[in-house]
Amino acid sequence: MELSKRLHMVASMVEKGSIPADVGCDHGYVAVYLIREGVCPRVFAMDVNEGPLERAREHVEEFGLAAYIDVRLSDGISGLPCRGGRPEADTLLAAGMGGRLMVKIMEEGREKLAQMRWAILQPQSEAWLVREALKKNGYFITEENMIWEEGKFYTVIKAVNLQNPPEGFCQKTLEAQEKRFLEECKSQGLLSSDEWERAADIFGSRLILEKNPVLLEYLKESLRKNRQISAGIDSASAGEAGAPEKEKTAGRLAQLAKEGQLLEQLIGIMK
């Protein structure tokens, strides 16, 4: 079964033998793929809207997978069933929605999320909010990937619940890699600890550490836009007369300069 590059990127991070709750499942493509490829024994395909859910049901029935894919109307993971006080899914899977909505789903479902094992999230916007929310909920980001498809950049984030980690998971190994990277950056005067924290939240620590080539292109495009906006503001402010307007413009230009400097530093590190 063929998935788009974006959905294949998401599906490729699902652990073999896990049971995902695919929130916002739309047509149920990922759920069908995971069952047909033998990745998962069972999948919950959930959506808050009946229309997309009906399309998912039709798709599931078309492939004869109704015994393996539980299609449910659910706002977030509120409709995810529990057995013995624990959610029946061990993975929160969500793709193709805004970062703020993902944070809302995690906050409203935090009791179930606390008992799950993995979160695999592909936010369409504000990925930094998702990374912050994962950390707040006790999850540790272990893997990230980024692709370019049909004129857009897409990021997927995988995280492990530190209170319920899978067998063999070693947080210290990943933290040591990050520590070595930061020490090397500091020794070369490239990034401070604060700059690294900001870069990791905004752009993704794993993407930076692994020098993801798509992230590098994203950084270059972001720097181009940053300079373009700065030049536009600078040009438009030439005729400003009042002190409040000039102060506001100066503040905005200073912020853009700070953002541009971080982008330049990261581009230099990743080349």
Image: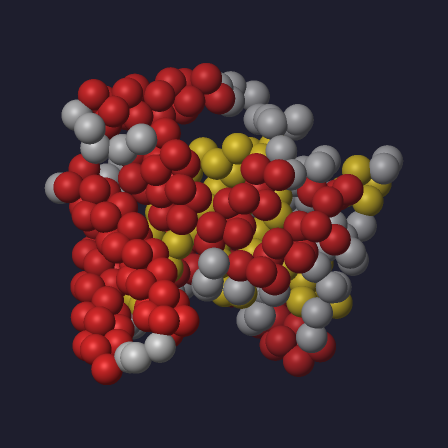
Front-lying residue, 179 or 247 = 247
Which quadrant is home to the C terminus?
A: top left
Query: Residue 108, percent across and down?
Result: 74, 53
Q: How far from the left and from the top, in percent, is residue 207?
A: 32, 42
Q: Is 41 situated left or right of 140 in this image?
A: right
Q: Quadrant of the N terminus?
A: bottom left
41 sits to left or right of 109: left
In the rendered image, the residue lying farthest to the right is 84
Instruction: Give the residue at x 36% y 48%.
Output: 203
Is residue 166 among the parts visible in the rendering?
yes
Residue at 56% from the left image edge and 56% from the top image edge:
94
Residue lying at 54% horizontally and 44% vertically, measured from the top left: 132
Percent x, y for residue 191? 27, 33
Of residues 271 and 150, the one drawn nearer to the viewer in this rendering: 271
Residue shown at 40%/42% (left/top)? Answer: 198
Q: Position of residue 183 (x, y in %)?
A: 28, 20
Q: Quadrant location of residue 244?
A: bottom left
Number of marks: 0
Above or below 233: residue 183: above
Q: Would you place residue 34 above or below residue 141 in this image?
A: below
Q: How is the image coloured?
A: secondary structure
Q: Is residue 105 left or right of residue 141?
A: right
Q: In the rendered image of this protein, does residue 197 appear above or below residue 78? A: above
Q: Please indicate, yes or no, whether residue 252 appears anywhere in the rendered image.
A: no
**Residue closer to the observer: 182 or 238:** 238
